[in-house]
Image: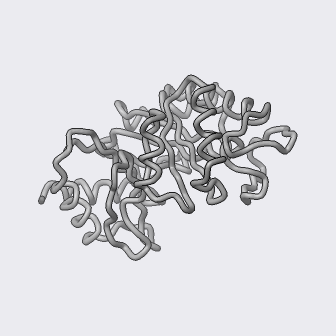
Amino acid sequence: MPVRLGVLLDDLSLNGAKLADPVDVVVIRSTFLNPPRAAAAKRQAEKIHELHRNAELIAYAWHYVTHEADDGIDPGSNRSLETTGKFGHFRSTPDVVQAWQISTICAEAFGATKLVVRTPASFSPGGMSRKRMTEFVQANSGPSLIWEATGLWSITEAVAFAEPLGIEVMGPAIGMTGQVLEFEGARWLRVPSGKDGRLRASQAEGLAFALAELDEAETLTLLFDGPRAHSNLRAFDRARELV
């Protein structure tokens, strides 16, 4: 099956990146807490493209769109939104509307046509969550969505709900114990690293074998996470060549 390789970045210093890295996608997660102003985002995009010239850039939506006040997000010294307290969970409120507008402006400055929305555990698979997300998608145009669901949503359940809305789903590729997981229709897979930041050779090989056995026409994107994202991407790319 067609596979694209990418990295998830919280630190845009690009430490460990090399010009020869086969990076197709760069996902900028730092915008979840701190979406830069348009001018700063354009400068950051230029910096990324100096190393990854043809990479697609994708940003995370600001946390005010998805996370409520009780979800434990502390913006700290990062950019914050003057709110009425009614934000998160895709609510139809001025706070969410403003946060989404800022997210889309940021995405446009990066040259991104997609935004990742990460929902908290409090965004359950119940009827209210489904209603709010459906109405949000129907009411808003702009970047297409990639949904990183956490909490009680299974990948199968998330895909079944999201596909009719035109939303793609991001799921984990490797579980807490290091095993390769079933992808179950997710088109975006986050590849975490171990405690030391490294992807084990056995994990890279297991993931390469699992993908080689899939007979699908749709493209799958692997996003390598953690402080050694680039070196882990290279390790997987080497393992893939041996399969």
Q: Could you tell me which residue is drawn at 63 percent across and 33 percent down?
A: 136
Q: From where the camera sits, is residue 196 visible?
A: yes
User: Front-most of 50 and 224?
Assistant: 224
Q: Nearer the viewer, residue 235 or 176?
A: 176
178 relative to 207, above or below: below
Q: Is residue 121 left or right of residue 194?
A: right
Q: Position of residue 56 (x, y in %)?
A: 40, 33
Q: Quadrant of residue 190?
A: bottom left
Q: Residue at 47% of width from left, 44% of height from top?
A: 161
**Quadrant of the rendering where the N terminus is positioned:** top left
Where residue 144 sits: x, y (%)?
A: 49, 30
The percent coordinates of residue 114 (x first, y second) are 49, 32
In this rendering, the answer to whether 101 lies above or below 18 is above
Nearest the eye: 21 or 144: 144
Q: Is 22 left or right of 29, judged from the image as shown?
A: left
Is residue 46 visible in the rendered image? The answer is no
Q: Quadrant of the C terminus?
A: bottom left
Q: Residue at x 38, y 52 (%)?
A: 189
Q: Is residue 238 left or right of residue 71?
A: left
**Farthest front residue?**
127
State the residue in front, 149 or 138. 138
* Image quadrant where residue 211 sits: bottom left
Give residue 194's position: percent from left, percent from top.
42, 71
Residue lying at the far left of the rendered structure: 242
- The scheme the figure's colours follow is one colour
Q: How many marks?
A: 0
Extreme residue in the bottom direction:
177
Give me the residue at 71% from left, 45% from top. Answer: 88
